[in-house]
Image (cartoon, helix red, strand yellow):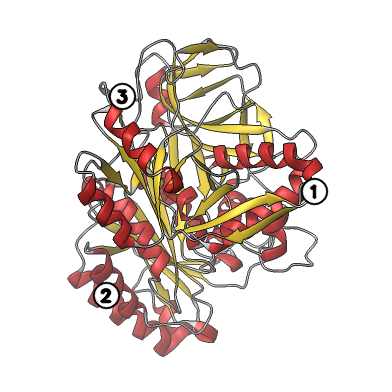
Amino acid sequence: MSIDKEVSRRRTFAIISHPDAGKTTLTEKLLLFAGAIHIAGSVKSRKASRYATSDWMEIEKQRGISVASSVMQMEYRDCVINLLDTPGHRDFSEDTYRVLTAVDAALMVIDAANGIEPQTLRLLQVCRAQNTPVITFINKMDREVREPTDLVDEIERTLGMPVVPCTWPVGMGKQFKGVFDLRNDRMRVFTAGEDRVGANDDEIISGIDNPEITARYGDTFTHARQEIELVQGVSPTFDREIFLAGKQTPLFFGSAINNFGVQEVLDAVIDFASPPRAHKALQRTVEPAEPKFSGVVFKIQANMDPGHRDRVAFIRVCSGRFERSMRLKNCRTDKFFRPSSVVSFLSQRREQVEDAWAGDIIGIPNHGVLQLGDTLTEGEDLQFTGLPFFAPELFQTVEVADPLRSKQLRTGLAQLGEEGAIQVFKPVAGTLLLLGAVGQLQFEVVAHRLKHEYGCEARLSPARYVAARWVTCDDERELQRFIDANSHRVAHDAVGAPAFLASNSIEIDVAAEQWPKIKFHALREHAGLIFHSNAVS
């Protein structure tokens, strides 16, 4: 099959939301409707015999939250869907930001009772910065929730872009009767679902003027019809080009826990979202249908298989065709290698793949050879850009409780640092390693994983720093002078990039004044490149 045909079949998107909006539940139900799984897992019940497919880590099962992104590939309507479930919790937002660089669209899940929440807004800003198209799904309509017109108004005001309703709820809470599909002029009647599909097909009633709907649902449908006429009067018509430019969002309503409204969303992903888009490299723009393979490492996950202590590099295929055992060049190290074991994912479950095409997400098990941000090609020197690494805001020192387990601590921190679960800093002066994070929960997860995955009890203690800025200088000797003069507050991160550590924000301002040639950065790329050349903030 031709590259063009295979690329056109791909859809790669991420699901984003505030915690507890129902993102992981929706992921399960999308897998269910696509036929990838036959029974959906539960996210909430700690004692449930099954857990969500995408929540495979022990700590995720214990807490009922997602702490790492997971990848699932499935086929639906002759398309190959690469679906990425992301952590909703702010403490793990870095993982989500990195995932958003590897997708062509995002599916935003909103809790109908709460509307747009802070973390949703932060993720949306990342999407807007990259012009990533967003499909919106308002979840939990079977509960007592806010008026749908209020939600539409809030989304438009917050996003600063028009909303195009594609479905509309008939009632809500206990009076929730179903959703009216505006694209196809029909109503899907609500029935409380289970964890399977196919046993009871949903009832469909065609036509908004069908007297059967009014006779059955009375005032509830009459009110919904008035709202539909109102929103259709003020909403623009759906324009796929405007949507793909990230300037319009189609809107769907439903209840993921009840399998309801999921089918329409899945169809919208196929119909609306684009096939893989071009990727910018420092050297040139790479088109997906180019014959030669290129890809970028956007995520590393340690210990997906607890029995083998492995590390898997997640690769977004940017162009061409990947074939197993093909000779690949790591452009960062300038070295070639042949991956013998390459996998596709259904969360923790994997399958060996013989080939993959632009848009696909594949995994290459590796032992520290690949890092976040690495570009892989068949020989061309390329460097894909845009994989963010944020300056941490919280710091703790780490030491091993049992000195005999020091090796396990070093190994664990090296691997978790590679994964991006935590930032590890080695001070220029001093022996204790520093951990940097954007949220407190990251420290708890790292301590848990060090203990359970590496057999190493770690002691974490608060450090006196509150901010870090990576430092660069056009004059290498000046940079070294700065490091020597500030050795008590300079540390190197996992890739050896020096960072200035401050106990308060004023220290950064003072240092910037005293060393005018030194540049302070709040953001860098994983490949070591700096995003902002003037950021002292």
Q: Secondary structure at mark 3?
A: loop
Identify which amino acid the numbered label 1 is placed on. Asp
Cα separation between marks 3 and 1:
52 Å
The residue positioned 38% from the left and 57% from the top of the image is 123
Q: Which mark is residue 303?
A: none
Tell me the quadrant of the picture where the C terminus can be found: bottom left
Label 3 vs label 1, nearer the camera: 1
Residue on which disc 2 sits: 153
Q: Tell me, yes or no, whether the two marked residues, 3 and 1, touch with CB atoms within 8 Å.
A: no
Q: Nearer the viewer, mark 2 or mark 1?
A: 1
Which numbered dot is residue 287? Answer: 3
Image vertical order of residue 179 relative to residue 222, above or below: above
**Residue situated furthest bottom in the rendering:** 219
Residue placed most toward the observer, 374 or 257: 374
Q: Position of residue 30 (x, y in %)?
A: 55, 52
Q: Residue 424 sits in which quadrant? A: top right
Asked if residue 203 shows in the view, the reply is yes
